[in-house]
Amino acid sequence: MNSELEARAALRDLQALARQMSLYPTGHPSVGEALLHGEASLEKLASEGDGEAVITFLGDSIYLGRRLLPHASLEFSALLRTMQSRGIESITLTSPISGGDVADLGAFVAGLSGDVPAERTIRLNESPFSRSELETAKSGGLRRSYGRSLDVLRGMAASIESGDDFDLSGAAWAVEQLVEQTISQPSAALLLSTMKSHDEYTFFHSVNVCILSIALGRLISLPDDQMAPLAMGALLHDIGKVRVEPSILQFPGRLDPAQWRQIKLHPQEGAAAILAASAPYQEIAATVAFEHHARYDGAGYPAAGRRERDLHFYSRLVATSDTYDAITTRRSYRRAETPNRALHVLLNGAGSMYDPDFVRAFIEMVGVYPPGSLLTLGDGSTAMVTKPAEAAGDLPDVVLVRMADGSYPDHPVPWSLEDQEVVDQVLPEQAGVDPPALLEQAGVIVTTV
């Protein structure tokens, strides 16, 4: 039976191959390395499936055989849209995979060639599954709202980069859906907000900050009519980064003064882009974009010198969510930190960098062990938190993802922390696990509402 892990590896390597082929000539070492990785992962996926595997791209979803891959559908939503733009509805893989077919597929996906794989170990649009067979697995409303918010941000970014006019009606619709889904499923939303993407950091980060801000607004009993404006500001807070050179955003070391000056312009750029459009909540969203790096004590940018009384209520709230998600995400210049470490940063900055009231409320919302935390237990096993504790003194819901003997269960096992000692909180690479794959296997947020 094909596993979600092999499918995700194959999709990741195919995406990387298409990207390298679009950047470099065929004989470049980076292309050669990407071809080797792609051939190996596609072959592994096919061989795990008794010699054949079928990946289907349908609507907002990616399927392996008849199985919906809900989190992979989000993680690789950009690849999903690329496939659809190229007219690819399915890919059928037959072992042994030909290296020539992998190269042909990469060039086709990259838009460099109209030739389909010639040796037919990789076949396009020959899925044995009908649309009705696959559509019986309905995607969850929360996941669908997340994915469509990513699409809205991609569309806005493309318009800003090309200088085209745009409006914010799509963003207004997206945030209304996210508000509805997050309020109806707060625990599932918090868990989904742990989704990360190194290639599309800004877009995934923006949706995560939106979800966290909605959940925080709900916790502090923000009136219903204020939730959508808050969510709009949170979703668009980083849109100005579209105007920052990718080489600077992805720079692996300390920025020089010129690079740092460009980074510090993104709040103004974002506010200007939002004000140039027309939609409800436009001015509030522009204010949040402009102020989200203006510290509580007035020492931030670009509004240096402004004190907490001058900063918008939403800006101070979004700044808290923004910091938490940024710290727990791997960047080109630093590794991700654990959720617990992110909470310590917020706590240490309360009253100076961050509004102390929002910091306290945020920690109350996510608990001592936020969703997605990987906990090393006293017996050497590892558990992942899927739901925060509901009240002080309660324990969070967890699943066991690594056994005490170092082996891994086929699927995450519902577990209890009762009578268990939590020794440490670790990063995924330290635990040897892949959180998106674990979410897939745990069956959370698959077909909810």
Image (cartoon, grey):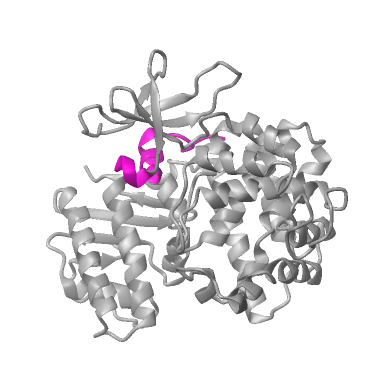
Residue at figure coordinates x 58%, y 48% from the top left? 208
Residue at point 35%, 37% (across, down): 441
Depicted 128 relative to depicted 441: above or below? below
**Which quadrant would residue 357 be assigned to in this image?**
top right
- In the displayed structure, 293 sits above or below 390; it is below
Residue 433 lies in the magenta stretch = yes
Q: Is residue 356 above or below residue 56?
A: above
Q: Is residue 256 left or right of residue 138?
A: right
Which quarter shows the N terminus? top left
Left or right: residue 198 compared with residue 28: right
- Span of residues in magenta: 428-449
- Which residue shows up at 44% across the image and 61% down it? 80
Give the residue at the far right of this rendering: 309
Q: Is residue 190 left or right of residue 305?
A: left
Q: Quadrant of residue 35?
A: bottom left
Residue 122, percent across and down? Answer: 22, 66
Whether residue 95 can be seen here: yes
Left or right of residue 318, residue 328 in this image: left
- Relative image position of residue 9 (x, y in whole percent): 30, 55
Number of on-image labels: 0
